[in-house]
Each structure stands twice: as C-alpha cells, then as structure tokens.
Image: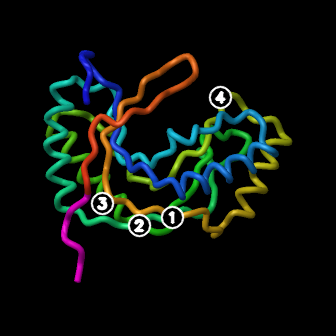
Amino acid sequence: MIDNKDSVRSFVAVVPDDGLKEALVAEQEQLARKVRGVTWVRRDNLHLTLQFLGEVERARISELSAKLSSVSESVPPFRVTTAGLGTFPAEATRTRVVWAGVIEGASDLGELADRIGRCARESRIPVDDRPYSAHLTLGRVRRRLDLESARALAFSIERSAGRRLGSSDVERICLMASVLKPSGSVYRILESFPLTGPREG
C-alpha cells in the first residue's frame, strides 16, 4: 500500500510473467557479452510502461486508483509478444536506451495507455502527450558507447529484426512506485488492478 510520504514517484505499467522475463534476461546476457557501457535493467524491474506520472501527491494517487479500477473492469485480458531490438535514439553511437519491441498486443497497450492518460489528467496529474510507443526497456546507457560496442549493438539490432523474444499474458495493470537507492531504482507495486472486462465472442 501507499506509505506516508507527501508524494510518490510513480507510473502505471504491465509486469510481464516469469517466462517473458527469463527470455529477456537471456537477451540481455547475450548483449552484455558484446556491448559495454550499458546498465541492464534488473529482472525484477522489467516492465512495460503505460504512463509515467512523476512525483504525485498521495491524494492524487488515491483518486487515480479509483479511476484505474474502473478502467481495468472494462478491459479484457490480452497477450503481448516481444520481437526485435531497438534503441532511443536510433543512432547506435548516441544510444541512451536499449529496448525490445512489441509486435502482438501493441494496439491494446496503446488503448490502455490513452485511457490511463485521460484518467491521470482528470486527477490533475500531467502526463506526456507524445504518441504511445510500445516497448520494454532492457538497458540504459549512461555515457556514450565506444565505437566497438556501438557497432556490436547495431549488428545485434539488425540481426534481431522480426525475431520473437517471448510472450506474456496481460491480466492486470499495476500502479508502481519508483524508489531511488544507491544501488539504483527499485520498483514497488502500490496497487494491482485485474483486467476483468468481457472478452469478444
């Protein structure tokens, strides 16, 4: 549950199942052998962000929770499949984020993100207006990659095109807290909302 701090650095996300997490960790391990200078996301922190909320007052969090519960009750479970690798920005030598793409369930994630964004704005929580891009962050680059690592990463991305990495059923959305510690960010589930909407057919 929510602690007694005045505000919570938070976001709404889908937490993949263990099978997909293991597949993504295996991908990280392969990349780490060839690409230096990337801080890889820990297994327990792997997630699909739907909306980043930033620092939010507790009262706003409680209000948003009620709205998220309403959304989850109208959305049926669905499946996501990850495939291919990419970076933000796309140029390997300027990479800041390494990610896995989503080829199945991307539109469902996008619709969820839009609805959650509307709920956040109704609760007076500002969110990013840019179009939603379904991806799962695998690692972050703190400093510019050396040329050898940049080339290895670009080659890995090229070879990964269309290659499926793993799948996960999406059965709930989670309101998460991000706590910054000396060892890095730790993510904690504040509240979980099962998707219980009627299935088509």
Residue at horizontal 23%, vertical 53%? 115
To which residue does mark 2 refer? 79
Q: Position of residue 94 (x, y in %)?
A: 68, 39
Residue 128 visible in the current orientation: no
Q: CA distance from mark 4 to mark 2?
A: 32 Å
To which residue does mark 3 refer? 111
To which residue does mark 1 refer? 167
Q: Position of residue 9 (x, y in %)?
A: 35, 26
Image marks 2 and 1: residues in contact by CB distance under 8 Å: yes
To which residue does mark 4 refer? 142
Residue at horizontal 62%, vertical 62%? 84
Other-residue count near label 4 (Cα within 10 Å), few / some / many at <14 / 14–19 / ≥20: few
Q: Residue furthest front?
A: 18
**Three-letter amino acid code of the residue under disc 2:** Arg
**Three-letter amino acid code of the residue under disc 1:** Ser
Other-residue count near label 1 (Cα within 10 Å), few / some / many at <14 / 14–19 / ≥20: many
Mark 1 or mark 3, which is nearer the start of the sequence? 3
